[in-house]
Image (cartoon, rainbow, N blue to C red):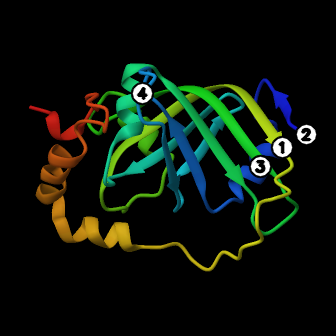
C-alpha cells in the first residue's frame, strides 16, 4: 500500500542515502512526447532539506531531463531496495538545471565529491510530495561496485571533446526541446 508524505522524513532520508542507484523521470508537455526514465549511480544524489534535493548530472547520451525541466519543471525520483526489506520511494517535485559558471553553481557543487569527469550540470528539485510503497516484487540483487565506464569515457574525451560532444548530443531532446547547456556559453 502506498503512503504519501508532504516531505522527506529523517527515516526516509537515511534509507535513500543508503541506496546505490536512483531513477529520474521527466516528460515533455506534448501528449506524444517521450517519457524519459534514467538510472543514476555513483555518489551523486543529495537531500538538501525535507523538501529539497539535488544530483550531480554527468554527461550522457542525451539530456532529456534538462530539456523537460526547462519546458515544464516536472520531475520524479525513484529509489528501490534490492538487498533489504522491500521498499520503494518516489519523490515528486519541480526541478531546475544549474549550469557550471552560473551564480548558483559554486554553492551547489560543494555538496558533491569533486573529480568526476564529464560533469554537465546539477539538477535541483523542490519536493512537494514523497511516497513509499512495499516493493514486494523488486528482486534481490547484490551491489558489487560502482561502474566507472562513463567516467573513463569522459576523461578520454577531455574538456574540449566533452564540450563538443555536449553540443552535438545534449543540446536538444528527442522531442526537439532545447536543453540548457554549458557548451552554449559565449
- The image's mark for residue 32 is 4
Check disc 2: other Cα within 10 Å, few if <14, some if 14-19, many if 20+: few
Do tag 3 and tag 1 residues touch (Cβ < 8 Å)?
A: yes
What residue is shown with label 3? Answer: 88
The CA span between labels 2 and 3 is 11 Å
Dot 2 or dot 3: first in sequence order is 2
| Helix, strand or loop at mark 2 | loop
Dot 4 or dot 1: first in sequence order is 4
Do tag 4 and tag 3 residues touch (Cβ < 8 Å)?
A: no
Mark whose residue sits in front, 4 or 3:
4
Q: Position of residue 141 (x, y in %)?
A: 72, 73
- Taking the spot 27% from the left edge, 64% from the top edge, the residue there is 154
Check disc 4: other Cα within 10 Å, few if <14, some if 14-19, many if 20+: few
What residue is shown with label 1? Answer: 133
50 left or right of 100 in image: right
The CA span between labels 4 and 1 is 29 Å
What residue is shown with label 2? Answer: 1
- The image's mark for residue 110 is none
61 left or right of 45 in image: left
The CA span between labels 2 and 4 is 31 Å
Looking at the rendered image, the quarter that the C terminus falls into is: top left
Dot 3 or dot 1: first in sequence order is 3
Q: Residue furthest right?
A: 1
Amino acid at each position: 500500500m502506498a503512503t504519501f508524505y508532504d516531505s522527506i522524513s529523517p527515516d526516509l532520508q537515511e534509507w535513500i542515502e543508503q541506496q546505490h542507484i536512483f531513477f529520474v523521470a521527466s516528460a515533455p508537455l506534448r501528449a506524444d512526447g517521450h517519457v524519459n526514465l534514467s538510472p543514476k549511480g555513483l555518489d551523486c544524489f543529495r537531500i538538501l532539506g525535507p523538501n529539497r534535493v539535488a544530483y550531480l548530472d554527468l554527461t550522457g547520451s542525451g539530456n532529456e531531463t534538462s530539456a523537460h525541466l526547462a519546458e515544464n519543471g516536472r520531475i520524479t525520483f525513484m529509489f528501490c531496495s534490492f538487498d533489504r526489506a522491500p521498499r520503494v520511494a518516489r519523490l515528486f517535485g519541480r526541478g531546475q538545471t544549474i549550469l557550471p559558471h552560473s551564480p548558483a553553481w559554486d554553492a551547489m557543487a560543494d555538496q558533491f565529491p569533486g573529480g568526476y569527469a564529464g560533469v554537465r550540470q546539477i539538477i535541483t528539485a523542490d519536493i512537494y510530495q514523497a511516497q513509499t510503497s512495499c516493493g514486494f516484487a523488486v528482486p534481490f540483487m547484490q551491489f558489487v561496485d560502482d561502474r566507472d565506464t562513463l567516467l573513463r569515457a569522459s576523461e578520454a574525451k577531455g574538456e574540449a571533446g566533452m564540450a563538443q560532444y555536449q553540443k552535438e548530443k545534449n543540446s536538444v531532446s528527442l522531442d526537439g526541446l532545447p536543453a540548457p547547456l554549458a557548451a552554449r556559453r559565449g
